[in-house]
Image (tube, grey):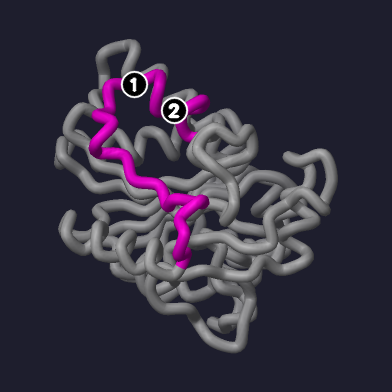
Amino acid sequence: MEVYIANDYTELCKIASKNILNVIKSKPNAILGLPTGGTSIGMYKELVKMYKEGILSFSKVTTFNLDEYEGLGKEDANSYYKFMYDNFFKHVDIKYDNINIPDGLASDSNKECEEYEMKIRKAGGMDLVVLGIGENGHIGFNEPSDFFSGFSYRVKLHEDTIRANSRFFNSADEVPKYALTMGIRTIMLSKKIMLLASGENKAKAIKSAIEGVITPSIPASILQLHRDVTVVLDKKSASLLSWSDSYKIV
């Protein structure tokens, strides 16, 4: 595991986007697992900038989003489908057929998750998965539990996740109670993983994930077992880390 501590959020986003650039440069038809959420917005802006400057093309790239809320359609203002299009996809040259996001309105969520998993396998697995982290240590929508999840599945969201995400809705009551997400096993099968975190509110989760014991009560802690993980933090999210000598300050 390589840990980079950036001076601020802007620098974090530049490091993250350069890591994605390197993956695509080495494999133009790369398979990427992509996140939503506030931390990823700056990264997407940097990638769009690279595309507009002619540094990077997504024309051969295939993407699989980590998750989607159950019950929200593509045009819903709070759907992750719309988030991705507004913040990234509509600004670059990615092909529509190469974009994969779980269908929040699927008549059978469990079947949708099974089919989504099969699409990932048919594509050959992911070359890089980019993750954010919740305040409770969740990655994707894999919530704290008594066991690590398997492949893509329908998940009931924890109250703290609903509360944290309520800032994007008019109230916590409007936040969907279920979501469709890549499972821990799906994520861990990716060739590379990059975890991003920004802000003091993520510091406790980051310390537990990187320096704590491996436990399903902190889902992100499983990343300690992956062979190729890059963690990119800003100073605030890294503020509780104690093994500073082994981390790269950038």
Q: Specify whether 56 is left or right of 150.
A: left
Q: Residue 103 location in percent, x, y?
A: 44, 50
Seen from the viewer's position, the closer of residues 232 and 40 is 40
Report if residue 95 lies within the magenta region: yes
Measure how far apart labels 1 and 2 are at the Cα level.
Answer: 7 Å
Segment tinted magenta in the rendering: 84-109
Residue at (45, 55) in percent of width and height: 106
Report the number of discs. Answer: 2
Label disc, if present, on residue 88 of the rendered structure: 2
Q: Residue 145 location in percent, x, y?
A: 62, 81
Residue at (51, 56) in percent of width and height: 247
Residue at the front extreme?
107
Report if residue 103 lies within the magenta region: yes
Above or below, comparing residue 215 to residue 11 in the picture = below
Q: Specify whether 22 is left or right of 134.
A: left
Q: Quadrant of residue 187?
A: bottom left
Quarter of the rendering occupied by the N terminus: bottom left
Residue 218, can we see it?
Answer: yes
Find disc 1 in the rendering and name its residue.
Answer: 92
Q: Residue 211 location in percent, x, y?
A: 59, 72
Q: Amino acid at mark 1?
A: Val
Mark 1 secondary-structure assignment: loop
Residue at the bottom extreme?
146
Residues marked 1 and 2 touching at CB (< 8 Å): yes
Above or below, comparing residue 209 to residue 24 in the picture = below
Residue at (61, 75) in percent of width and height: 218
Seen from the viewer's position, the closer of residues 58 and 27 is 58
